[in-house]
Amino acid sequence: MSQPPDQQSDSSARPNSGLIGQWAREHRHAMLREAGNWAGDAVTAEDIVQDALWIAHREAGQLKDAGKTRSWLIGIVRRIGRRGAGKRARRAGLLQKRQVDVEAWLMLETDSDSRRDEVLALADSLPSRQREIIRLVVLEQMRGAEIAERLETTGAAIRQSRRRAILRLKAMVQGGSTP
């Protein structure tokens, strides 16, 4: 029984899984090397190679010259890697901008003695850890690594607590509710 035309598989357009496996064995090292240029770590590079092999399987009909399989596969890896690197760069830029905006607000708010006292008075309503972090940032002008060392925790935990504390303070100063 034959399948309807829209459900028939075009075996000439897609290689069998054995051919994809052969490509993976023959070109995996070169693909991983190219993915490593874009990814930076082995796990992400491996993910890029897996995605590239899946796309190669899906788009195998576009390969016109079997002698150029390696360069075609590396081109797919490069396209995926470039897209991922762009996403990571945009994401990092946005996160960095948000963090700078929040910390800049705190520095501007505590620029004068009277504003500093007001912000510190509002900080009394924060949870104890956040209150301590704000006091160390405002009064002692300590950086994240120094605070982490003093409070015996990680820099990431300090950054997260500091950001939450600043956002709460900002909401209180602007007359809103705490987040």
Image (cartoon, rainbow, N blue to C red):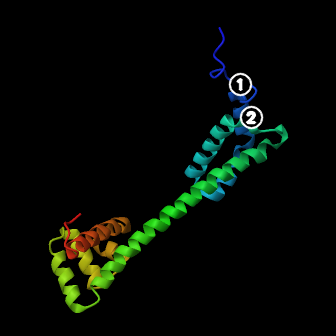
Residue 18: assigned label: none
Structural distance between the alpha carbons of marks 2 and 1: 9 Å
State whether residue 113 is above or below residue 137: below
Q: Nearer the viewer, residue 12 or 151?
A: 12
Residue 33 in the image: x percent, y percent? 69, 53
Residue 10: assigned label: 1
State whether residue 42 is above or below residue 14: below
Relative side of 104 to 48, left or right? left
Crowding near the residue tagged with mark 1, few <14, some 14–19, many ≥20 C-alpha atoms within 10 Å? few
Image quadrant assignment for residue 144: bottom left
**Does residue 138 appear in the picture of this structure?**
yes
Residue 81 in the image: x percent, y percent? 62, 54
**In the image, what residue occupies the spot 18% across and 86% down?**
117
Crowding near the residue tagged with mark 2, few <14, some 14–19, many ≥20 C-alpha atoms within 10 Å? some
Relative side of 84 to 148, left or right? right
Amino acid type for the residue under numbered disc 1:
Asp
Residue 107 in the image: x percent, y percent? 32, 83
Total numbered labels: 2
**In the image, what residue occupies the spot 67% across and 35% down?**
57
Q: Which residue is mark 2?
A: 61
Q: In the picture, which quadrant includes the C terminus?
A: bottom left
**Does residue 32 appear in the picture of this structure?**
no
The secondary element bearing badge 2 is classed as helix
CB within 8 Å, label 2 to label 1 = yes
Q: Residue furthest toward the front?
A: 5
Q: In the picture, which quadrant includes the N terminus?
A: top right
Q: Residue furthest toward the bottom?
A: 113
**In the image, what residue occupies the spot 66% across and 52% down?**
79
